[in-house]
Image (cartoon, coloured by chain):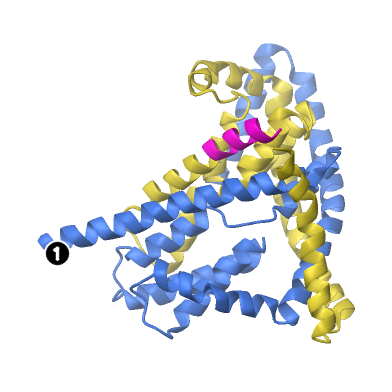
Amino acid sequence: MLNYLWGFMIIIGIIVGVFKGNIADVGNAAITSSKEAVTLCISMLGIMAMWTGMMQIARKCGLVASFTKALRPIIRFLFPDLPKGHVVNEYIASNMIANILGLGWAATPMGLMAMRELKKLNADSDIASFDMCTLLIVNISSLQLIPVNIMAYRSQYGSVNPAEILMAGIIATCISTLAGLIFATTARRLRRRNNRRG
Amino acid sequence: MNFIIYVSNYIMPFIFFYIIGLGLLTKTPIYDEFIKGAKEGFKVVIDILPTLIGLMVGVGILRASGALDLLSKLLEPITDALHFPSELLPIVLVKMFSSSAATGLLLDIFKEYGPDSYLGRLVSIILSSTETIFYTMAVYFMAAGVKKTRYTLAGALVATLAGTIASVVITNLVF
């Protein structure tokens, strides 16, 4: 996917640059942009390390585990087909918590383990189960409450108050997740009713 | 709606207070754990660096050539009808495929208009409320060996659309 997207960006940029007579700027842009990426990453190092450091404390003192426990009733409601006490419940909970806390790199492995278990529960079918659809929709709808990276970018580009968008972002995130969940539960019910009739 | 900005300033300090307080109460070696976690963060950023270089170069070329301006002019009739800024439509579309490419475009908006401009705030909120659709679906379903994804894509699009509309409405209300 990215192979084409990135390739097109550069090819189209160069073609347009030639036609618009901006080709000198194009060459310069390539050089300055690559340097800028490094500067950006250096300031991101600070913010990201601070956040993951805090999250490590949260994990160590049992905060993450107690959040995971608190999610259980919600997971039972969203994924009614899951067998109780099955390990997949834990995977889904960890995936959601990691997403909420903005630990995307920790969320994906948990999500993938959940998918593999869901596939087993679905008799190894190559058609997605209802639970898989819900898990994906939840993940795509974004659960992240604190967008650490966006705050880092904002501060790097001179924002007076990088955190000012936090609450607005949380509201928008909740709305997108809610919309996704309403869709997922409705689709599940409709399909099930149709199956019964058929 | 100043209240929403006001609350935003409290969120991070509150989270830190809560985590550190709980850490002290449970007698967790907080500083040692912080250092351990911070090292983890380094790895994350180092992993992002090559992608960021690649995509910032790509977007930098697009911007310098005038292709981005051309694109938003082309999109203007559509975005005007939707009451959505034409500069941001490419980001929303690209984000469905790749979150790092969207980051490249986000940084371009910050550079061109500033993070505290209307566009800068709106794009910050949009990108914090949506995830990449096709990439996530590809990774998750490939790992499980699932070929028929049923209504997942429709649900993901509904969530993304809702998040984007909500972002526009909130930005207009709050800022």
Vertical relation: B175 (above or below) B30: above
Question: Which secondary structure is most common in the magenta stretch?
Answer: helix
**Residue A21 x %, y %:** 72, 12
- Observer-nearest residue: A44 or B16? B16
Determine the residue located farthest toward the right in the rendered image.
B31
Please give the residue where the numbered disc 1 appears in the rendered image: A196
- Name the residue rendered at 57%, 73% in the picture: A94
Subunit that carries the residue with mark 1: A
Q: Which chain is yellow?
A: B
Q: Is residue B41 visible?
A: no
- Name the residue rendered at 51%, 76% in the picture: A91
- Observer-nearest residue: B74 or A7? B74
- Name the residue rendered at 64%, 64% in the picture: A105
Question: Around disc 1, counting alpha carbons within 10 Å, would you say few (fewer than 14), some (14 to 19), or many (20 or more)?
Answer: few
Chain A rendered in what hue?
A: blue
Range covered by the magenta-colored residues: B165-175
- Observer-nearest residue: A116 or A158? A158
Quadrant of residue A78 within the rendered picture: bottom left
- Count of marks, rendered view: 1
